[in-house]
Amino acid sequence: MRKLLLGLSLLTVGLTTSCEDYFEVESTHYIDADKDHLTTPADTIYSVTGILNKVQAIGDRTILLGEMRGDLTRVTNVTASDLRKVAMFEIDDDNMYNQPRDYYAIINNCNYFIAHADTAMKNNRNEYIFLREYAAVKAIRAWTYLQLVTTYGKVPFVLDPIMTEEDALKDYPQYDINQVCDYFTTEDGLQDLADKGYPLYGDIRFLNSPLFFFPINIVLGDMYLWSGKYWEAAQCYHDYIMKRNGSNSAYPIGMEAVLWGSDDYDAETDISYTSYIISMFMNEAYSTNGELITMIPTDSLKSEANYSQLRNIFFSRTENEYEASAMPSQALFELSAAQNFWDYDSRTMTYNLVPKNLSHYADGDLRLTAVCKIYEDETYNGKKISNYIFNYKYNTRNIHIYRRTMIYLRLAEALNRAGYPLYAFKMLATGVDGDVLKEEICPAYPQDSALLVNNMNFSSDKYKVFTPSASDRSKLNTIGIHMHGSGYVMGDTTFVIPQLATLADSIEWVEDKLVDEMALELCFEGTRFYDLMRVSMHRNDPTYLANKVYARNGKDSSSDITVDLTNQSNWFLKWKGQIGY
């Protein structure tokens, strides 16, 4: 009887060729692989559970490889050697974060399920029984391949389940980012499964949430975005937003923001941020207006195999003796302080620029202030703590992958590159509804007015942009993303696209604003290095990424990174000469 890696614990089979360590073909928990199909609910539940278990194994590195190599975090005196090497681009074959086998364990499980699930089976109501599981597993496989190829640059591409040692020894083609994205957007049939929903298992509580799965339209949007098919990416993100809560529904960006609570501007007492923190980072319950879209649930006990260390890296806790391993970089502090915050006086109905230099911790944009509480003079058991941080983004044990504002930012990135920089910028400045689209955006693109109204609309009966002077705020549900931390941006007469010579110049200017917004909004969430990589690829300019990362210690400091990041091959991990450039 052949056995397949589908269970909760693994037994590695040692092979003797170049594939020996990243293909595993045996498990201590298995199903009979001689069966033609997975034909019972028990088969599919067991298989999906095994796949999600394997996804847990790559959760931490998904965040850390994307965050520690960017420009928004710095290591500390307690950062472990392997993680420090990640931050310094000195990752060797033995680094704990350089383990391609874990990605292929997910992929091999998915390949088996896709090959063997009986998607033609129907129940007595003529409904397909396993189609939701099938769609979810195909999305997990596509997402995993995207993580793998953006990490290593070029990877063995395998679509059939590896069942035997002979399978593992085959010579598989090496696919780069464009080839992986092209396959999943043109050949895999994911588009046809985007509206199938998610598998829900009733009484099995830990599987009974859409938050544990990867929405196909988002995965496809990411694939299109990486491969430079910008309009297609925008359509996928927009489709997800429009259909996330069912047909004829809405998923507006919401009204949460960090604001000054009074005009005294006392950073200790006058910042109002509770709703922003709770709704965006601490609420892990699925709801129609929830910020969280996808998370990887992890074990609750440190002794368990898939316990996440992210809280112990980003957050000061008893387990790490209150010494965090990753802190905000000087570059992030400088970027945050450089923003203008605009307040609104309802008595005079005027916008006012908040003075700078009120506090080194509350200058400019307030999101960093709201997310991180940093204390410089704390002590623990008589020891002075030098890296004490209370980071709300890591106040739970689970790993957040997708959230609503991230998707709106990627939609803006795609629209900008598709040739609509004003549309993208409005998503930052004020938000977009049907009136903004028709009255402000469409006149800038008269030749595409019908296209935008018909295919990229946020109808005003479901989306309504906030204005502080509105008499009835109950129906308002949309703000600009920059308003999350920089106040009433509509009052900032300088926050507009300047008159530039060409459309290409406008696209690049807006893209710079988007990259800054990604930093302000998504810091510590594991996307930064990949965002810089993707934008550098859009521009065909590796120095864009290199200069950002080199400046992580601040604009007046020299870089401590010795690797040449203008050489694109150095962006990717390499492993034993078998994977990567």
Image (spheres, rainbow, N blue to C red):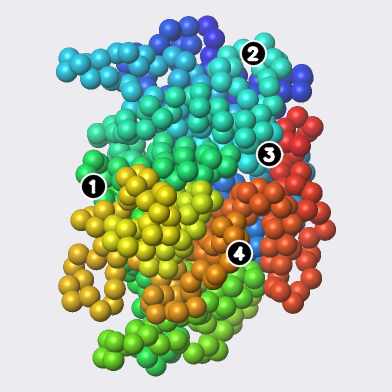
Give the residue at mark 1: 249
Q: Callout 4, which amino acid?
A: Ala
Q: Is residue 525 above or below residue 127?
A: below
Q: Secondary structure at mark 4?
A: loop
Give the residue at mark 4: 501
Give the camera-side residue of 413 and 49: 413
Residue depth check, mark 2 versus mark 4: number of the one nearer the observer = 4
Q: Please identify the quarter of the rendering in which residue 471 is found.
A: bottom left
Pointer 1 with pointer 4, Cβ within 8 A: no
The 10 Å Cα crowd at callout 4, few under 14, some 14 to 19, many 20 or more, is few
Determine which of the numbered discs, if any, sits on residue 152 in the image. Answer: 3
Q: Is residue 522 above or below residue 177?
A: below
> How far apart are labels 2 and 3 at the CA level?
22 Å
> How far apart are labels 3 and 4 at the CA level?
38 Å
523 sits left or right of 272 in the view: right
Q: Residue at x 47, y 51 (%)?
A: 415
x, y percentage for residue 432?
35, 60
Q: Residue at x 68, y 22 (%)?
A: 173
Determine which of the numbered discs, if any, sits on residue 167 in the image. Answer: 2
Q: Earlier in the sequence, mark 2 or mark 4?
A: 2
Residue depth check, mark 3 versus mark 1: number of the one nearer the observer = 1
> How far apart are labels 2 and 1 at the CA level?
47 Å
The 10 Å Cα crowd at callout 3, few under 14, some 14 to 19, many 20 or more, is many
Q: Earlier in the sequence, mark 2 or mark 3?
A: 3
> How far apart are labels 3 and 1 at the CA level?
39 Å
Q: Secondary structure at mark 1?
A: loop
> How far apart are labels 1 and 4 at the CA level?
40 Å
Q: Residue at x 52, y 6 (%)?
A: 1
Q: Callout 2, which amino acid?
A: Asp
Location of the C terminus (image quadrant): top right
